[in-house]
Image (cartoon, grey):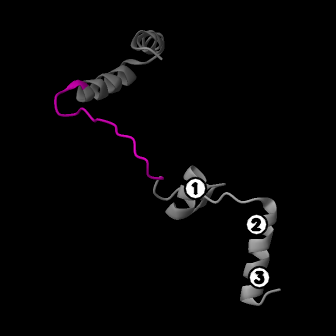
Amino acid sequence: MTATQLRTRIDNTMQKLTEKQLYVIYTVAEAFASEGHHIKSKQSDLPPKNPKLGGRRISDELASIFLTGNGLEATDAELEQMKYDYLIEKGLF
């Protein structure tokens, strides 16, 4: 959304607000516009802290696997063999 489009949407919304609501918005806008309150956003390549998957918290390591993949390129047959070898090694098969 461009700045002009955003200003138009804000102007349309402002017409519906009460005097108290307008004052609150003015106070917040002035705080952002004053010197020293500019916040530069930076993007990180790291996964978010305390990420969630399906509403449940997961570890950062698991989140990074979902975001970047695990780097394992194997066929289904190779994965089945790895699973079989693991179960044999653990004595579960």
Per the image, the residue denoted by label 1 is: 52
What is the CA distance from the residue labelled 1 to the residue labelled 2?
A: 27 Å
Residue 53 vs residue 84, the one in the foreground: 84
Is disc 3 placed on a helix, strand or loop?
Answer: helix
Residue 3 vs residue 64, the one in the foreground: 64
Is disc 2 placed on a helix, strand or loop?
Answer: helix
Between discs 2 and 3, the one toward the N terminus: 2
In the rendering, which numbered label is found on residue 75? none
Determine the image quadrant of residue 82.
bottom right
Nearer mark to the viewer, of 2 and 3: 2
Residue 74 is situated, as x and y percent measured from the top left of the image, at 71, 60
Which portion, as a residue range, is magenta? 33-47
Dot 2 amino acid type: Leu
Q: Is residue 37 above or below residue 49?
A: above
Q: Residues within 10 Å of mark 3 (few under 14, many from 20)?
A: few
Dot 3 amino acid type: Leu
Quarter occupied by the C terminus? bottom right
Residue at figure coordinates x 33%, y 27% from the top left = 24
Residue 37 vs residue 27, the one in the foreground: 37
Residue at figure coordinates x 37%, y 18% from the top left = 19
Dot 1 amino acid type: Lys
Between discs 1 and 3, the one toward the N terminus: 1
Determine the image quadrant of residue 23.
top left
Nearer mark to the viewer, of 1 and 3: 3
What is the CA distance from the residue labelled 1 to the residue labelled 3?
A: 30 Å
Residue 50 is situated, as x and y percent measured from the top left of the image, at 49, 59
In the rendering, which numbered label is found on residue 87? 3
Per the image, the residue denoted by label 2 is: 79
Residue at figure coordinates x 76%, y 82% from the top left = 87
| Left or right relative to 88: residue 38 | left
Residue at figure coordinates x 30%, y 24% from the top left = 29
Residue 22 is situated, as x and y percent measured from the top left of the image, at 36, 20
